[in-house]
Image (cartoon, rainbow, N blue to C red):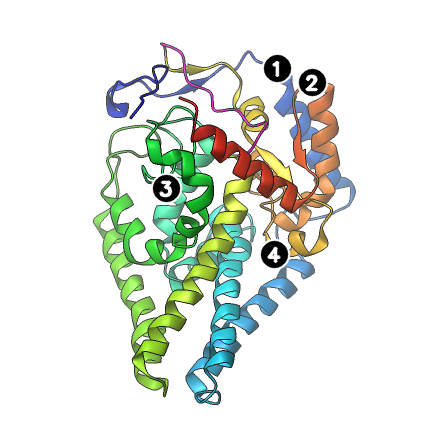
Amino acid sequence: MVKSTQRNTTPVNERPNLRFNHKDKPDFYVTLRKRVNAYFETNQLSKHYNTKMVTKTLFILTVFFATYGLLLSNIFAAQPGILLLIAVVHGFFTALIGLNIAHDAIHGAYAKTPFWNKVIGTSFNFIGANDFMWKTSHNGMHHSHTNIVDYDADIEQIPLIRLNPHQDLWWIHRFQHIYIFAIYSLTSIAWVFARDYAEYFHPKVNGKGKTDRPVWEFVRMVLFKLTYYTIFVAIPFFVMDIPWQYFVIGFIIMHLVEGLTLALIFQLAHVIEGTDFPLPDETNKIHHSWAAHQLYTTANFGCKNDFLNYICGGLNFQVEHHLFPTICHVHYKQIAPIIESTAKEYGLPYNNHPTYFGALGSHVKQLKIFGKEA
């Protein structure tokens, strides 16, 4: 095993808070916000949901509940192939709830008021995840400290996969670009049964020592998990008129589809050729300002693909999402040219892979590099 020599090995909870360089292009984000705000004001648009967003929400939820109802109806109990297809569709649309509905709401982007964002964001809990822990690890750690080792949980998941150049290098990592898809497929099933519990007790939050995590949130997490286990495990198991082996296979495949869908959208935005993985200096300071840092560490992909735009919940417009996470994703395509032109005006990168499969290939190449180089 080879260890990186660049990484600061001081325990995170013993370091001062991470800081960005506010003197680095200080006018960039001020100018950008003015231009984006002007777009909404000139066109008299809300930054939150619109008819398109509501229609999408209703469509996704309709398919989600319809497929669940079909599975319980036993109409296709004697046709396991059709049941499996329904389970696949259900798993895919479960992922779409997380990507399109819950994700926006937890960021405060779906609705104008915190109350309705909280209500809509609760949908995350009904698909087996936890909104409080996602807000803590994703909104707090990932968005604030993108691609910074020890601060961004998204690039430090399990030791078997090496998603950043500062992680310890194991011999098996040279094969990670091959086995990574099998691990990605386990994303949602791990989330439902393990990840949220583990993160609640994890000592790192926002690069600091353990911060306040109310006991009520853990109780609430357990209650929602039990609700999920009841609705999507216990009830189908006892109601569906099929052999138990078929149920187990269907449940696993449903989650494999959901997990792979989630992972192959989230990971393409940051662990890809052209994005940086900077380390703080000896004073725990990052060279760039926060806004510039987002441009150096983030990439878009397939932004001209209408199908991708529909299913990704704006996550293929990752640059726009990181700079304006409280704007509903249905507006990203329209504000993207403003952000791209302003970034170029200030001499900043605007990473954009034209196609999804091109971005996927770039992700695999990056994993191969991380698997061989310390």
Q: In this view, does 180 lie above or below 373?
A: below
Choose top left, top right, bottom left or bottom right for residue 311.
bottom right
Circle number at residue 25: 1
Which residue type does callout 1 highlight?
Lys
For mark 3, give the secondary structure.
helix
Q: Earlier in the sequence, mark 1 or mark 2?
A: 1
The answer to which of 154 and 105 lies nearer the viewer is 154
Look at the image and tell me in which quarter the N terminus lies.
top left
**Residue hosting label 4:** 311
Mark 1 vs 2: CB contact within 8 A: yes
Residue 63 at least partly seen = yes
Q: What stretch is highlighted in magenta?
A: 272-283
**Other residues around mark 2 within 10 Å, as few (<14) / some (14–19) / many (≥20):** few
Q: In this view, does 263 lie above or below 353?
A: below
Q: In this view, does 246 lie above or below 280?
A: below
Residue 155 at least partly seen = no
**Residue hosting label 3:** 136
The answer to if 273 sits in the magenta stretch is yes
Q: Spatial distance from mark 1 to mark 3, Cα to Cα?
A: 29 Å
Q: Spatial distance from mark 1 to mark 2, Cα to Cα?
A: 8 Å
The answer to if 350 sits in the magenta stretch is no
Q: Spatial distance from mark 2 to mark 3, Cα to Cα?
A: 32 Å
Q: Which of marks 1 and 4 is nearer the N terminus?
A: 1
Which residue type does callout 3 highlight?
Thr
For mark 4, give the secondary structure.
helix
Dominant secondary structure (helix, strand or loop) of the stretch shown in magenta: loop
Which residue type does callout 4 highlight?
Ile
Residue 351 coordinates in the image, percent (x, y): 64, 30
Q: Spatial distance from mark 4 to mark 3, Cα to Cα?
A: 24 Å
**Residue hosting label 2:** 346
